[in-house]
């Protein structure tokens, strides 16, 4: 392989072209690769960075090899190079933040295609935590005072979607009981009563309206007694999003841990119906270890997460390629073996003032399906997702929010409502608060299959192109069926195939019929 780098000079009006010899070391190959990127010769850039990485397998050389492959739309090859760079950064002391940042940056290029058995798996074999259903996912929604039916005092979302929710949540300020009024009570008694009549659980985002140091044992004990008196199951996320510097309780991690532990112990003593939720936001996760109270003081872990057409309202920073599962994967991996997980609040925007007048219905529906069906297939201990059903554009929650960052998160609108309604046809999604649920969960398709008959299979498919139009399925090269939306279901009749080795294959296509990815799974039928 030989490259010639041309240097063009103008001397006394004459054009002089000097030929520089082939790069001799990794640094020269790296420089050549950067030059080819600038001139948009991406194939030559890839070859140059390959040579640089061969001579010096540094994180930078692997990272830029990945960047060149992205330009060639070789996303699988780019992922291999990025992963080498990330692994090298992680092996260097003090470079963990760099590794995590690169992983987040390159997540959109990580394409996936996995097969799952949908009907035959047993529930997760772990002892449930407090308020954790044995199997299945609790569906939850935000509801304010307007959501309480004036006729019977129940939550009225059933009238809007034809079915209720297992969990209802809202924000609530922790105040001194001496400052309580009818409009601003010390405990949300009316909300709790409506939930009790509905037969659901309450999820309370409890935020101190005082310096954290002033949150006393007496104050929390009084609140705990009210919580027990309510008679409803309560998910209590105390002083959440502590990794947001805007929150007062973020400023002293040691004090935060002490107060969280105190709240946990008081709730355990006075309000056994309360499960404590420890919840950061999904960004700045590199700082959260210093805020972790310890496993003995945490019942559930959670995250807040949103899918936005434009990140922070910046129209040059699209959110289309971001998959919500990527934002929770590392957090789930770290904590799910020890605690059930909830998405404490989630929403996908279909309308934003960053681009007024544009319709983002398809975006919102796509992100909704990605999160719920992806969690169903891949994250069995993600047991609760709560939708933030609020219009931040026209509603009363706007406050001082920058105008470009205002989004419409409502769930009960055409498009999102229909996509969400698909969940109710799958028993795994629980619209009632049932801790003894024994619904089957999906399991990865096995290497050796001992099951016979007609099996219902599903696939998780993730591509750089977020809008997958169709996924087709083949067995040993013979077409079976196709599906146009998550979880991309199909049936496999094992009675019609012989014992031995077989190959399942999936192909994903965009709306123009372009193939996005192909994935195969070899299995043995006994």
Image (spheres, rainbow, N blue to C red):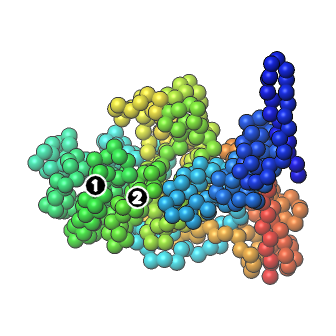
Q: Quadrant of residue 286?
A: bottom left
Q: How many C-alpha atoms fall within 10 Å of the one at disc 2: few (<14), some, or many (≥20)?
A: some
Residue 287 shown left or right of residue 426 in the figure:
left
Can you give x and y, in whole percent of width and height, for residue 455 in the image?
73, 69
Residue 52 shown left or right of residue 255 in the figure:
right
Between 253 and 425, which is closer to the camera in this rendering? 253
Residue topped by disc 2: 288
* Residue 185, visible in the rendered structure: yes
Can you give x and y, in whole percent of width and height, for residue 292 in the image?
36, 63
Q: Is residue 188 above or below residue 351?
A: below
Residue in the picture at 27% in, 66% down:
261
**Please, what secondary structure does the residue beneath circle 2 have?**
helix
**Please, what secondary structure does the residue beneath circle 1 have?**
loop
* 3D distance between C-alphas at marks 1 and 2: 12 Å
Residue in the picture at 59% in, 37% down:
318
Q: Earlier in the sequence, mark 1 or mark 2?
A: 1
Residue in the picture at 35% in, 52% down:
242
Tell me whether circle 1 and circle 2 mark residues in contact (CB < 8 Å): no
Residue 252: assigned label: 1
């Amino acid at each position: 392989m030989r490259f010639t780098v041309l240097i063009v000079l103008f001397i006394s009006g004459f054009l002089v072209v000097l030929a520089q010899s082939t790069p001799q070391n990794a640094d020269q190959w790296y420089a050549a690769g950067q030059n080819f990127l600038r001139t948009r010769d991406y194939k030559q850039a890839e070859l140059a960075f390959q040579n640089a990485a061969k001579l010096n397998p540094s994180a930078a050389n692997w990272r830029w090899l990945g960047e060149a492959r992205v330009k060639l739309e070789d996303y699988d090859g780019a992922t291999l190079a990025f992963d080498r760079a990330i692994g090298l950064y992680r092996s260097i002391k003090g470079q963990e933040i760099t590794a995590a940042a690169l992983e987040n940056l390159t997540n959109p290029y990580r394409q996936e295609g996995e097969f799952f058995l949908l009907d035959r798996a047993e529930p997760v074999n772990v002892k449930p935590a407090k308020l954790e259903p044995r199997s299945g996912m609790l569906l939850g929604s935000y509801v304010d005072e307007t959501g309480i039916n004036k006729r019977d005092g129940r939550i009225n979302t059933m009238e809007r979607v034809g079915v209720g929710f297992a969990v209802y949540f809202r924000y609530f300020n922790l105040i001194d009981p001496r400052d309580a009024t009818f409009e601003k009570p010390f405990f949300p008694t009316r909300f709790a009563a409506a939930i009790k009549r509905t037969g659901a659980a309450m999820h309370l985002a409890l935020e101190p309206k005082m310096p954290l140091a002033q949150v006393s044992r007496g104050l929390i004990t009084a609140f705990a007694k009210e919580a027990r008196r309510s008679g409803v199951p309560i998910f209590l996320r105390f002083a959440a999003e502590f990794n947001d510097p805007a929150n007062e309780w973020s400023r002293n991690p040691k004090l935060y841990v002490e107060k969280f532990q105190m709240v946990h112990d008081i709730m355990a003593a006075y309000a056994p119906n309360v499960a404590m939720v420890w919840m950061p936001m999904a960004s700045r996760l590199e700082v959260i270890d210093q805020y972790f109270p310890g496993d003995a003081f945490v019942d559930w872990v959670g995250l807040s997460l949103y899918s936005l057409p434009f990140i922070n309202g910046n129209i040059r920073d699209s959110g289309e390629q971001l998959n919500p599962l990527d934002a929770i994967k590392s957090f789930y991996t770290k904590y799910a073996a020890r605690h059930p997980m909830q998405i404490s609040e989630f929403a996908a925007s279909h309308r934003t003032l960053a681009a007024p007048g544009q319709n983002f219905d398809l975006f919102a529906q796509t992100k909704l399906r990605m999160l719920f069906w992806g969690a169903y297939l891949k994250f069995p201990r993600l047991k609760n997702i709560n939708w933030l059903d609020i219009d931040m554009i026209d509603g009363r929650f706007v406050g001082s929010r920058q105008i470009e960052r205002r989004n419409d998160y409502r769930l009960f609108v055409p498009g999102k409502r229909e996509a969400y309604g698909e969940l109710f046809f799958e028993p795994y999604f629980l619209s009632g608060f049932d801790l003894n649920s024994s619904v089957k969960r999906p399991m990865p398709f096995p290497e050796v299959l001992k099951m016979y008959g007609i099996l219902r299979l599903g696939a998780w498919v993730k591509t750089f192109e977020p809008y997958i139009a169709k996924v087709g399925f083949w067995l040993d090269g013979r077409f079976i069926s196709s599906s146009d939306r998550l979880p991309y279901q199909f049936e496999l009749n094992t009675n019609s195939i012989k014992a031995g080795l077989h190959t399942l294959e999936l192909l994903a296509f965009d709306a123009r019929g372009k193939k996005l990815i192909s994935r195969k799974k070899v299995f043995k039928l006994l």
